[in-house]
Image (cartoon, grey):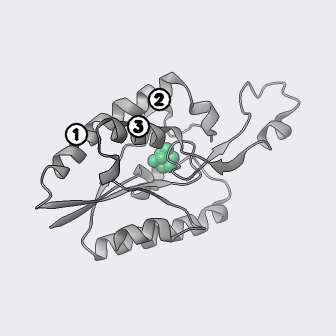
Amino acid sequence: MDQIVFVSHCILNTASKVVLYDLSAAGAEEALRLRFVSVALDKGIQLIQLPCPEFTLYGANRWGHVSNQFDTPFFRNHCRRILEPFILQLKEYLQHPERFKILGIVGIDGSPSCGVDYTCYGDWYGSFEERKDLEGTLSTARLGDGMGVFMHELADLLQAEGLADQVPLRSLYADEPHKCMDLLG
Ligand code: SF4
């Protein structure tokens, strides 16, 4: 039987991520990502790559955002549109339980889009030009409980299709590595 995990796009392609200037800050997450992918491949688990909602809307030169900024009807609509083909794939695999087992979906905690247990919040908006309070504005960014916008839409779609109980939603988060690793058995 094929075991399948749906993963956030950057678990398999870190080129999609926002450009990072302090790579050491991402070191623990990158180590866990490599461990997760390596164990999945060693166990013969199939990985299906979800689309990156930010890259497909704002491209490679986007700024880092917080979830408040993506919490718009337009971004939510974009998320739903790109998720639809994956919901169909999920349904088809679930229709053949004798051949396929969906282990779950893995997002990225802390992401404004792909966070599952934690996302980032902040009072961010406006032009940088002539701005006097930029440091103060940037300092409002914080990690907090809650889903990123893309995962929230995905959870809603699963709920609407009656699939939520069949598909565990987990996350890759360096401080809590068991959440993604336990999914692989
Ligand atoms: S939006 Fe999601 S898939 Fe895209 S880079 Fe951020 S965490 Fe990764």
* Badge 2 density bin: few <14, some 14–19, many ≥20, Cα 10 Å: some
Real-space Cα separation, disc 1 to disc 3, in angstroms: 15 Å
Identify which amino acid the numbered label 2 is placed on: Arg
Above or below, comparing residue 178 to residue 47 in the picture: below
| Mark nearer the N terminus (2 vs 1) | 2
Real-space Cα separation, disc 3 to disc 2, in angstroms: 11 Å
Label 3 beta carbon within 8 A of ligand 1: no
Q: Which mark is residue 106?
A: none
Identify which amino acid the numbered label 1 is placed on: Leu
Real-space Cα separation, disc 2 to disc 1, in angstroms: 18 Å
Return the residue nearer the eye: 165 or 109: 165
| Residue at x 34%, y 74% (from the top left corner) | 185
Q: Give coordinates of residue 131: x percent, y percent.
A: 84, 27
Q: Secondary structure at mark 2?
A: helix
Between circles 1 and 3, the one closer to the viewer is 3
Between circles 3 and 2, the one closer to the viewer is 3
Determine which residue is flagged by label 3: 156
| Mark nearer the N terminus (1 vs 3) | 1
Above or below, comparing residue 9 to residue 157 in the picture: below
| Residue at x 74%, y 34% (from the top left corner) | 123
Determine which residue is flagged by label 1: 88
**Answer yes or no: do the residues labelled 1 and 3 have beta carbons within 8 Å?**
no
Label 2 beta carbon within 8 A of ligand 1: no
Q: Is residue 127 left or right of residue 74?
A: right
Determine which residue is flagged by label 2: 76
Q: Quadrant of residue 139?
A: top right
